[in-house]
Amino acid sequence: MSPRRSTHRKNLPYAAIAVIMAVGLAVSVYDQQEHEAVVEIGLTVSGLPPNVIFVGELPPRLTLRLRGPESELLELLEQSRNLRREVDLAGRRDGEEIRFDPASLEDLLGVREVRVIAVQPATVRVLLARRATRRVPVRPVFTGTPPEGYRVETSKVRV
C-alpha cells in the first residue's frame, strides 16, 4: 500500500466528521432563512364612554404581512385565529386617525424573530356620535285578513 493511500485512510474519520458538520450547518441555515406570510388578526373597540358610539368603519380584521423564520411563522399561523388587537378609543377625538404601529403589533404577536413589514389597513379614522335614547309610543297596525278558519285576537297581542 502506498503512503499516500495510507494517509487518506487515516483522514477518513475526519473527512466524515467534516461532511456531517457541513450537512448539519446547511440544514440549520436553511431552517433559519427568512420567509414571508400573511396573518389576519381580529379587531375590537374599547374605551368608549356610555353615551358615545363608534360610527366609523372598523374592519373586522387587520391583515399583517410578516417576515421571519419559517418555524416561527408556521406557529403564528396556527395561533392567529385567537389573536385580537384592541383599539382603545378612550380620550380619542372625532376625526382623529389611529395608526397601527408595526412595533406594537410585533409585541402582540409575542415572537421576537418575526417582523411586521406591512399592515392593512394601516389607519382607521375615529368617527364618534352621541348616543341618545327616547321613549316613544308604539301602536301596532294590523293589515290584511287571516286565512279562512283563523283569527287574530288583537287584544292578546303584546308589543
Image (cartoon, rainbow, N blue to C red):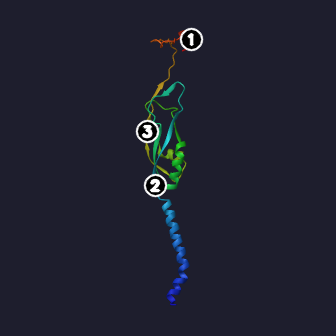
- Residues at badges 2 and 3 in contact (C-beta under 8 Å)? no
Q: Earlier in the sequence, mark 1 or mark 2?
A: 2
Which tag is nearer the camera, tag 2 or tag 3?
A: 2
Looking at the picture, which amino acid does disc 3 mark? Thr
Which tag is nearer the camera, tag 3 or tag 1?
A: 1
Kindly identify which residue carries mark 1.
156
Looking at the picture, which amino acid does disc 1 mark? Lys
- Residues at badges 1 and 2 in contact (C-beta under 8 Å)? no
Q: Residues within 10 Å of mark 3 (few under 14, many from 20)?
A: few
Kindly identify which residue carries mark 2.
35
Q: Quadrant of residue 143 in the image?
A: top left
Q: Quadrant of residue 123 in the image?
A: top left
Front in this rendered view, residue 60 or 106: 60
Q: Please say if 56 is above or below 82.
A: above
Name the spot of residue 57 as percent of width and height, x first: 44, 32
Name the spot of residue 62 as percent of width and height, x first: 46, 41
Which tag is nearer the camera, tag 1 or tag 2?
A: 1
Residue at the extreme top of the image, as rendered: 155
Q: Quadrant of residue 97 in the image?
A: top left
Q: Residue at x 53, y 70 (%)?
A: 21
Kindly identify which residue carries mark 3.
123
